[in-house]
Image: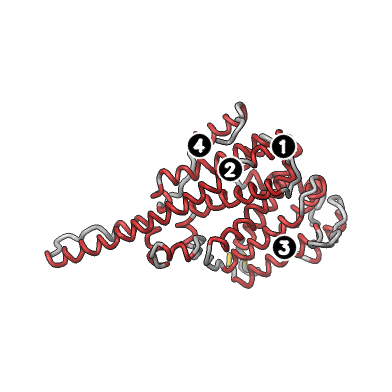
Amino acid sequence: MEADFSLSHSIRTCKQLTELAHSNFAPAFALLPSEKCQAMQILYAYTRFTDDLIDLPDFDPKTGQEIPTSVRRKKQKLNQWVSVVEAVLGQIGAEHGFVGSANDVKAFQELAEKYPNCGGLVLLPALKMIVDRFAIPREPLFHLLDGVERDIEAKPFETFDDCSEYCHQVATSVGFASLAIWGTAVPLFSDNVIKAAKACGIAFQWTNIMRDLLEDYQQGRVFLPQNEIQRYALTPNQFGSLLNRQEWNAQKVMPKNINAADKFSFNHYVQEMEALEEKFSKLMAYELNRCEAYYENSVPLYRLIHRDSRRMFGLMWNRYYSLFNTMRKHPLQITSDKRAALSGFSKWRLYFHWRFMPCMNLK
């Protein structure tokens, strides 16, 4: 059966993907005018598929069972996706891509024949439409692909500059594409827009990083800069052990029927563990305080956005900031198996507030 690459089907697929993802962003999109809401659903579908691409499983063609995806296979899938996106949007510096318009069904069908295993191709007619309609710059859409490429081998970041570059690739890039849809009071790449958008991207992504520290570590990923972990006199192994606070605390429980000599040694051992905990707490405080500074620097972005899009941005910003504030007030949540999250009541309270009583300012 031939795939449907009509624009209407592509738009519906993007909307369905957004709804199935149960993203916290979806309620915020509803605060936009209908055309901008649809565009954000399409942009979200593209970013979600791109972000999930390397983690999507492969299946044995004979048995149909899931098989491990190697680094080489992940790179193959990403390279194919890059080729398809370039064919639709055009390479950076090129005038046009292989696909002339969002309604060029024949061109999309030819791409499907050339890349038969590219499941995300059906999303691209809609993406092509909003790129043309809202003059979305193509560079940010490709920067996101660069960020996903860095995720494949999950190499630790040596410095914060390295990590902030990654944040710009996976978060600020989406922010600039979104700003093109929302509209800005001054040109998109004005200095004040760039400064505030970059601060917002780092604030949002750093909130995600802090929330997912334990989960990422268990998957072999550490996003905090290595030189900052070392600055607080922690080894990578100590840092990882301190993240799993439940197991860490279990090691501090004195065994029963311990003799006096061993009891003295054990107490000394516990004191050393508590000294490491203090170092870890100072590291977390440092990371959270820096994130707070980026939130402060992102506040001016609210007034630079077109009025009909401010409610949506305000809701997104307040949700992220509330999540960050939860971790700042209760830093042990960072090391809990149950990661920090807003309650359903808090989410609806924020939605109600921005839906019916939008603020003049974020804070």
Q: Which mark is residue 306?
A: 1
- Give whichever of discs 1 and 4 has the lower sequence position: 1
The residue sitting at 21% across, 59% down in the picture is 254
Q: Is 278 placed left or right of 183 in the picture?
A: left
Closest to the observer, 186 or 114: 186
Mark 1 vs mark 4, CA separation in Å: 29 Å
Residue type at tag 3: Trp
Q: Earlier in the sequence, mark 3 or mark 1?
A: 3
Residue 221, given in percent of the width and then of the height, sits at: 51, 63
**In the image, what residue type sits under mark 4?**
Gly
According to the image, label 4 marks what residue? 344
Query: What residue appears at the point 50 percent right and 43 percent down from the top-left corner?
Result: 323
- Residue sticking out furthest to the bottom: 72
Asked if residue 290 lies left or right of residue 358, the reply is left
The amino acid pointed to by label 1 is: His
Residue 280 position in % (x across, y down): 38, 57
The vertical placement of 88 against 196, above or below, is below
In the foreground, 120 or 236: 236
Mark number, residue 24: 2
Binning the other alpha carbons within 10 Å of mark 3 as few (below 14), some (14 to 19) or many (20 upward) gives many
> Badge 4: how crowded within 10 Å, few (<14), some, or many (20+)?
few
User: Residue shown at 74%/52% (left/top)?
Assistant: 123
Whether label 1 touches label 4, CB < 8 Å? no
Report if residue 142 is visible in the image. yes
Q: Earlier in the sequence, mark 1 or mark 2?
A: 2
Q: Which mark is residue 45?
A: none
Task: Work out how far the residue at label 2 is from the one at label 4, CA to CA, in angstroms.
Answer: 11 Å
Point out residue 195 in the picture as x, y percentages from the top left corner: 64, 49
For the N terminus, which image quadrant? bottom right
Helix, strand or loop at label 1? It is loop
Q: Secondary structure at mark 4?
A: helix
- Residue 81's disc number: 3
